[in-house]
Each structure stands twice: as C-alpha cells, then as structure tokens.
Amino acid sequence: MFTDPPPRKGKLALFNQSDRITTLALPPQAELLTPTQSIAAGMKAGQGQEVRLACEHLLLSLSRFYQVSPSGVRVLASRLLRIRENWSSELFGGYDPSSMAIRVWMRPAVKKNFTSFGTFLSTLCHEYCHHLDFQHFQFSDSWHTRGFYERVAGLYHCARGTPAKRLFWAPTSSGRWRIDWPRTNRG
Ligand SMILES: [Zn+2]
C-alpha cells in the first residue's frame, strides 16, 4: 500500500495537513458491530441485498456520528469493466465526491473468488474516509496520505471490533511512503 505522490505546490499544504491527521474520533464500537456482523453474515451467504442493507446501516450510523451528509452506497456483485472517469477507482471500490456515492464490489473483476470480508470492510471504510475528507474535514481533495491510511485503519478496527495496530511506514525512492507490513504486523 503506497501513499500518493505529493501534489504540486498549490495543494501541497492541504496534502500535508491530510498527512498529519493520523487520528479520527471514533463512534461507540457497539453501534458498528451489529451492521458489521450483518455484512459478514450476508457475504457468507452470498446475499447481496443483505450486505447492501447492512452497509447502508453502518454508513448511516457513521454519518450521524460525524454529523455529515450520508453517503450513498452500491454493493455490486462484480466489478464493472467500464468505469466513469470522475470516480476515484480502486481495486475493490470507489468514491465519487460529486454524488457522494460509494461503490464496493463483492468480487473484483480479475479474480474469480469473492472478496474476503476483511478486504470488503476495509474497502468500505477506505471509501468512507474519502467521504469524510470532503464532508468532515472539508478538504477540497482527498489523497492517500499516511494520515488517510491511519484514519482508515482506526475506523476499520473500530467497526470490526479488533484492536488498532500501529502502522509503520517506510520511505520509497519516489518520495512516496509504503506500509511496512512485516513491522506493522509484529507490532
Ligand atoms: Zn482511495
């Protein structure tokens, strides 16, 4: 997992601000565990409708907590090959700031297997953190900074009911950062 390269000067201050915000206020875990468990159950049963309702429930709880406009969410069985350009498109999901809509795929295009529950939930939290960048932090853009990934990790562990891990970062020659997973997993 890599951070985005820093943008040109005009937006660099904002990028650095996003990089520095490594914590996110988190809602009471009990509120998130019920929808999270329903997502897991729906995925296990292959019930797209159940997964979608549970995702809506989870995101509504979050939006109430952060006092932001709710985001829409679409749970798609598998990844569409044609992707509209304004979506920040990622392997397992996407977020469109203009319509405040999140998409998550239960199965990525290149793979036959279903996305694992952990990856799915982490994608949902990732896309929701893009939503928070615009709606909660009022940033004019949303980058994958170290701070962004830290906020995603905090939200993910809260929603899953697992202890938060400290992320360790390693610099790359291109000025980007990558998560040092062996060190992060060792704790
Ligand atoms: Zn992203």
Image (cartoon, rainbow, N blue to C red):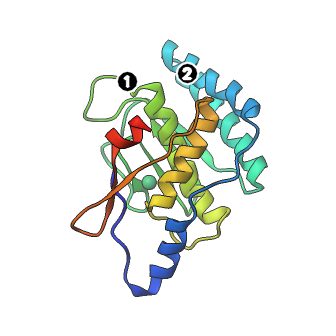
Q: Is residue 40 above or below residue 1?
A: above
> Is residue 75 shown left or right of residue 34?
left
Report the residue at 39% width, 35% height from top.
Answer: 186
Can you tell which quarter of the image residue 34 is in? top right
Residue 59 in view of the camera: yes
Image coords of residue 158 (percent x, y): 63, 37
Report the residue at 32% width, 39% height from top.
Answer: 182
Label 1 neighbour load within 10 Å: few <14, some 14-19, many 20+:
some
> Is residue 70 shown left or right of residue 150?
right
Report the residue at 51% width, 60% height from top.
Answer: 147
Q: Is residue 72 above or below residue 170?
A: above
Q: CA distance from mark 2 to mark 1?
A: 12 Å
Q: Circle 1 sits on which residue? A: 114
Quarter of the C terminus within the rendering? top left
As helix, strand or loop, the secondary structure at mark 2 comes to helix
As helix, strand or loop, the secondary structure at mark 1 comes to loop
> Is residue 186 shown left or right of residue 163?
left
> Is residue 59 shown left or right of residue 144?
right
Image coords of residue 3 (percent x, y): 37, 60
Can you tell which quarter of the image residue 77 is in? top left
Q: Circle 2 sits on which residue? A: 40
Q: Amino acid at mark 1?
A: Phe
Image coords of residue 9 (percent x, y): 40, 86
Q: Amino acid at mark 2?
A: Ala
